[in-house]
Amino acid sequence: MTNGSIRRAQLISPFGVGAMTVLVDGSSVITCGLDHWFEGEDVDVGAYRIDEWRLQRRLRVNHFRLPPDHRTPYQGMPKTPNLRLAIPFLRFPTWSFCPYCKRLEQQPLALQGKARCPDSRHQHSGKPAIKGPAMSQVPFVVICEKGHIGDFPWREWVHRSIQPTCRGTLRLHAVGTGSLSGQLIRCEGCDKSRSLEGVTTATSVDGEPTTVLTSRLEKGADYSCRGWRPWLGEATQPCGQPLRGSLRGASNVYFPLVESSIYLPQSASSTPPKLLEILNRPDFVTALQFARKTGEVTSKTIRIIDEYDILTPFTDADIQAALDEVSGGEKAEHVYDFDELSPTEWRRPEYDMLRHGIDHPNLVVTTATSPYGDAITEAFSRVRLVESLRETRALWGFTRLTSSGHKLKDGKSQLWKEQPSPARDWLPAYTVSGEGIYLELDEQQLQSWERREEVQRRAQLIARRYMSVVRDRLLAPREVTPRFILIHTVAHLLINQLIFECGYSTASLRERLYVADERGSTMAGLLIYTAAGDAEGTMGGLVRMGKPGHLERAWSAALASAEWCSTDPLCMEAGEGGQGPDSCNLAACHSCALLPETACEEFNRFLDRGLVIGSLKEPELGFFNS
C-alpha cells in the first residue's frame, strides 16, 4: 500500500479533487471525488462542519466541511469517532515505463505500490527474476477544456488509428534532442514508430480551433475527448472537445476554482458581541455541532448546554439572534446567486463594512487613534486597521487549460460521482484568521486622473492584449480599466515593501481588491491581510505597520522602489510591448511588482508601475505624480 501525507489546506488548493500530486515514494496520484471523503465505522461529520452564511448562499450548499484529518488511537484511549479517516487517492497516469528497457505497460487505477516490469530481458541465467525493476509513471497525459483528463493514447498515436488492432509491445525511447521530437514511441509488433512532436500544440482546421493530437492522430478522423474522469473512477459520455497532450506537472493541467468570503455579521443587529464571542468558543462550537445532529438548535438547547450559567445575563431573543449569526442564519434575506451576481457586487458588502468599521468577534475594523502624516493623507482618503478577520475558502470545482469560464453547476458536478440532495450538499473548505490594512484612494482625484487621454491609452495596451487572450481561449470578457490596474499595482508594491519591513514570508500576505467604476456605486479600495492558515501574522504585526508613524515609512519606501526597478530601463521601456503572464503586464516584473501566485487574485496580470509613478517618457502619467 502507498501512503502519503498532505496538509488539509492543500486539499482545497492546489491539490483538490481532480488534481495530481506526487507522493514521497515517487508515485503520481490523483485526488478522488467527495463521495468517499468521510467513510469509516464511526464518523461524526459535525466535527468538521463550517458555517459561513454568505458563502453558503453563493455556492448553494447546506454547509462546508474541513477535509478530514487522520487520527490514530492510542493505548487506553476511549472509543471516539473519526478515527483513521483518510482522503482516497488513485494511481494516475495508469501507464508506466521501464527506465532500463523502456517498455510501456498499463496498470489499473487502484494499483497499490510500484509497478514492476514484466519484460523477459530482465531474466538472469535462464531463470525469471523474482521481481522486475520498478517502473516509472509516464510524464504525459491528455486534457480537454471541460476538465477531463486521461492517459495519453500511446497505442493509438503510434499506429495512427483511433481503433488499432495491433497489440504489440510498446517502448518509449528518448533519442536526439530533449524536445518532444526526441520522444519516440515504437511498436515491436508491427515495427511502427512515431515521435511526440506537436502533441501539446493547438492548431486550426478550416478555421475551427482544434489540436494536433485530435486532428492528426488518424488522417481523416478526429480523436476527441471521451469524457475521462479518473478521479471518480469512471468516464462519462464523450464530450467531443479537442484533446491536448501535456506534461502531468504542467501548470495548465489543474486550476482550482476557489471562492472566498470574509465573514460579515448577518445583520446590523444589536446582538451583544460578548454573546457571539461565547458561542464561538471551542467548547460551545463542539456542543453545537453535536446538538445539530439531533434536531433544531434553539435558545433552550443552548441553556441546557450552558453548564456554568454564563449565558444567564442574556435573553432568549439575544441568544436566538446570536445563533442565527453563528450558524449561518437560515432566515437571512440576502441571496448571492453565483452565476448572476458579479464578483464586484459580491464584495460590496465587505467594502461597506471595511470602510465604515465594525466591532465583532470575527471582524474588528478600527480607525487609528492619531492622525497620519502627509505621505498617507495625500495618497489615500481612508485607512482602516483590520485587527481581526475570518476568511473562509471553499473549493467548488476546477478547470484545465484555462483558468475561468465554468458555471457553478458544472464546477460542482466535477467533484461528485453522485451529487447529494440540496439538504445534504456540502463542499470542502477551511477557515483562516488574520489581520490586515484597508486603504482607499480618493474618488474625485481618481476620476479626474482616469479620464486623461494618455492614461486611457496606456491602459488600453493591457486591455487589448487581454481581449486577444479572451478570443483565443473563449473566456468570458471583462473590462480592464486604469482604476483597476492602478489599485492592483499599488497592492503589489505595498505588499512587497511590507514583506521587507515586517519579515513575513512572501506567501503570507494576500490582496483583496474592491474596484468598481459604475456611476453612483464606485469602489476604489484594497485590503492587504495575513491569512496563511497558521499562527503567522496573527499577533498584530501587520496592524502595527498600518498605524501612524509606520505606514508612512512603508508607503514612501514602496513608492521610491517603484520609481526604479533593478531591470530598468528594460522593464519600463521593453515592458510596454507586454510581459508576464499572457503578456498582460507593462512595467512589472519579478524584480519590482510580481508576487507569489497565492498572494495575487489575478495570476500576476494587469500590473503597471507606469500608471503609479509615470513612465520614463511621461513621468506625469502616474497617479501619484500628477
Image: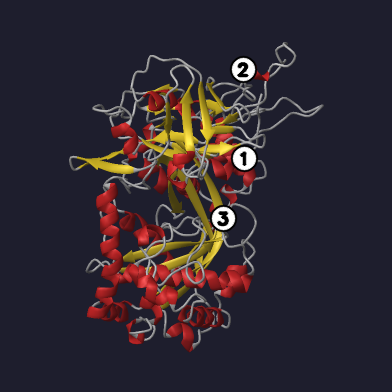
Query: Which colouring convention does the figure follow?
Result: secondary structure
**Disc 1: which residue:** 6
Task: Name the residue: 73% across, 16% down.
Answer: 124
The secondary element bearing badge 1 is classed as loop
- Residue drawn at x 41%, y 40% as measured from the top left: 398
Mark 3 or mark 1, which is nearer to you?
1
Residue 418 image point, x, y percent:
40, 24
What's the distance in space between the residues labelled 3 and 1, CA to CA? 21 Å
Disc 1 crowd, CA 10 A, few/some/many (<14, 14-19, 20+): few
The CA distance from mark 2 to mark 1 is: 32 Å
On screen, residue 357 versus residue 544, left or right, reads: left
Tag 2: amino acid: Pro
**Residue designated by label 2:** 118
Mark 2 or 3: the one toward you: 2
**Residue 486 x %, y %:** 37, 72
In the displayed structure image, the side of residue 51 where residue 451 appears, left or right: left
| SS for dot 2 | loop
Q: Earlier along the polypeptide chain: callout 2 or callout 1?
A: 1
In contact (CB < 8 Å): disc 2 and disc 3: no
